[in-house]
């Protein structure tokens, strides 16, 4: 018997003959949300947490988005920008960077040479300052938001914004490849020295689309 066989056997014994749904119902009497907020307050809370996590937050209406994205890419000095296949074409209509498409044959080294990536998102959570990507058409595959060093994520507010993690879970499909992002990638060593960009983009910019 291999190690894999032993692990699977233990799982089968733990969940019982009829699977994980055969056991007693787990009480879920915790708070679904901490406080009552207006849509504007919800947006402000998300922006505050994102800023605390060292992300840069921008607000714009739909008509101002192309100019804002062009400005952010120019300010970054980006020469190339990677966009998922389902990103609305007009979002980058004002940008003059070379457009890179995600190809299955692209290697991590090729993606690492991309200056910036622009995506949408599936959902944002105000109480935790978290963005959730699920691999949708305007987000692309997970790897394109983990390898390039600069990520611009666009969140449609208030439609894509919820208060809490429990609310988010009910709206997300667990079968999809979910990526939860709370600020730029960061870690710290044993001496608590913060290092950014180890597990993902060093720079995260979030555009709240529809917020003024």
Image (cartoon, rainbow, N blue to C red):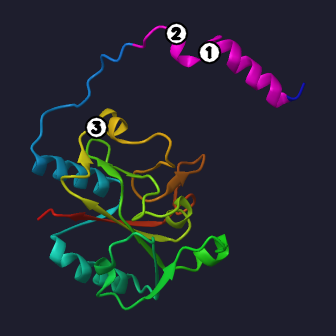
Q: Secondary structure at mark 3?
A: loop
* Callouts 1 and 2 close, C-beta under 8 Å: yes
Q: Secondary structure at mark 2?
A: loop
Q: Which tag, 3 or 1, sits closer to the chain's start?
A: 1
Indicate the position of residue 166 as horizontal and vertical percent values.
Answer: 33, 32
Which corner quadrant of the image does residue 125 belong to?
top left
* Disc 2 from disc 3: Cα separation: 27 Å
How packed mark 1 is, by other alpha carbons closer than 10 Å (few <14, some 14-19, many 20 or more), is few
Indicate the position of residue 164 as horizontal and vertical percent values.
Answer: 28, 37
Which corner quadrant of the image does residue 28 belong to?
top left
Is label 2 or label 3 in front? 2
- Residue under circle 1? 15
Residue depicted at 30% across the width and 16% down the height: 29
In the rendered structure, which segment of residues is drawn in magenta?
Answer: 3-26
- Residue under circle 2? 23
- Residue under circle 3? 164
Whether 205 is among the magenta residues is no
In the rendered view, tell whether residue 88 sits above or below residue 80: above
């Amino acid at each position: 018997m291999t190690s894999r066989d032993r692990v699977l056997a233990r799982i089968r014994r733990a969940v019982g003959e009829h699977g994980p749904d055969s056991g007693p119902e787990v009480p879920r009497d915790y708070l679904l949300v901490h406080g009552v907020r207006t849509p504007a307050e919800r947006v402000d809370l998300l922006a505050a947490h994102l800023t605390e996590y060292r992300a840069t937050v921008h607000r714009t209406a739909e008509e101002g988005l192309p100019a804002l994205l062009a400005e952010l890419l120019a300010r970054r000095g980006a020469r190339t920008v990677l966009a998922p296949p389902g990103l609305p074409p007009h979002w980058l209509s004002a940008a003059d960077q070379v457009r890179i498409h995600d190809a299955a044959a692209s290697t991590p080294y090729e993606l690492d040479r991309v200056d910036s990536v622009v995506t949408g998102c599936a959902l944002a959570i105000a109480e935790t300052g978290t963005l959730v990507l699920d691999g949708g058409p305007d987000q692309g595959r997970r790897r394109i938001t983990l390898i390039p060093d600069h990520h611009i994520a666009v969140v449609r507010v208030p439609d894509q914004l919820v208060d809490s993690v429990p609310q988010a879970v009910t709206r997300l499909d667990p079968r999809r490849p979910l990526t939860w992002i709370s600020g730029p990638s960061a870690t710290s060593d044993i001496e608590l020295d913060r290092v950014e960009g180890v597990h993902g983009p060093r720079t995260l910019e979030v555009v709240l689309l529809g917020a003024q």
